[in-house]
Amino acid sequence: MPTQESFNKLRKKRLAVRSRLNREALLYVKSEAITPDLVAQCFLDFAEETPADPVSLANGLAREHRYFENPLTSAELERFSHQTVVGIGQETRGRNKGCFPLVLNLLKTLRDEVPGLGFPGGRVRLGETPTARLHKEFLEESGLIPEIVNPDEPMAKHKIGEEEHEFLAYEVKIVGGKTKPAFSKGEQIVAIVFVDGKTLTEVCRKDGRINVKGFGVVGVLRSHRLVFLEYLRKKELEKMAPSAVEEVAYV
């Protein structure tokens, strides 16, 4: 379990890099990388107000760019592909039945250093299938055992950055296990947060922020919001499909 000392060290580290991140964001704005088209796309993706502060938008985009496109060492290039996989699904047991589990990872943050929430998952290793990686990472990060609903086809996906890193989301059902955050040298997951579908939908369509007991305001990471909104659209289409078939048969 995380200690107060480990929290203090992480807090000092975040404060130390914040000024550097802001300087990078200012340069990002001055380079005219934040275009009206980019702002409009953010508005369409998240159905939120146009960002009033270009520096904040630049900061968030630059952080995501660094996370997925940092130059890898030769050893890392031998291990990882250009894919990240996550699982989106509902708990099927107990008091959290029907809720979506997300992990609170102190190493992943939104702009302004707000701690980031995301669906369990991880980066795919070379020679490994996304579904195999998902089974392993989901269990390691959350302690929960997933069953992939359709392993042949991701439920949602999108590209990130110039290198076109592929972010994949599969639909899963939680069929076993017990919640256990993965707090270690490589992972700084401090909580498993269960969110009901209605709340998560509202959060992802607005500013991504949600209040978590014991941690205050945290935010769902941008890529995870995108795939969840795509997941919702797919689920709506699935509900409509039987009606469409009946209509054609009737005609």
Image (tube, grey):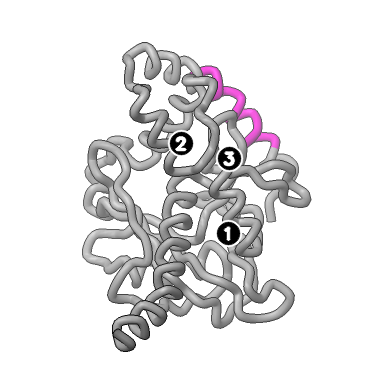
Query: Residue 164's x, y, as percent?
Result: 25, 44
The one nearer the camera, 151 or 20, is 151
Disc 1 residue type (three-letter): Leu
Q: Residue furthest front?
A: 251
Q: Residue at position x 70%, y 35% from top?
A: 8
Q: Quadrant of the N terminus?
A: bottom right
- The CA distance from mark 1 to mark 2 is 24 Å
Disc 3 residue type (three-letter): Asp
Query: What label does residue 102 carry, if any?
Result: 1
For mark 2, what is the residue? Answer: 43
> Vertically, is 126 above or below 55?
below
For mark 3, what is the residue? Answer: 207
The one nearer the camera, 45 or 99, is 45
Local SS, label 3: loop
Q: Is residue 184 magenta?
A: no
Query: Residue 192's x, y, as percent?
Result: 64, 60
The one nearer the camera, 214 or 238, is 238
Disc 2 residue type (three-letter): Phe
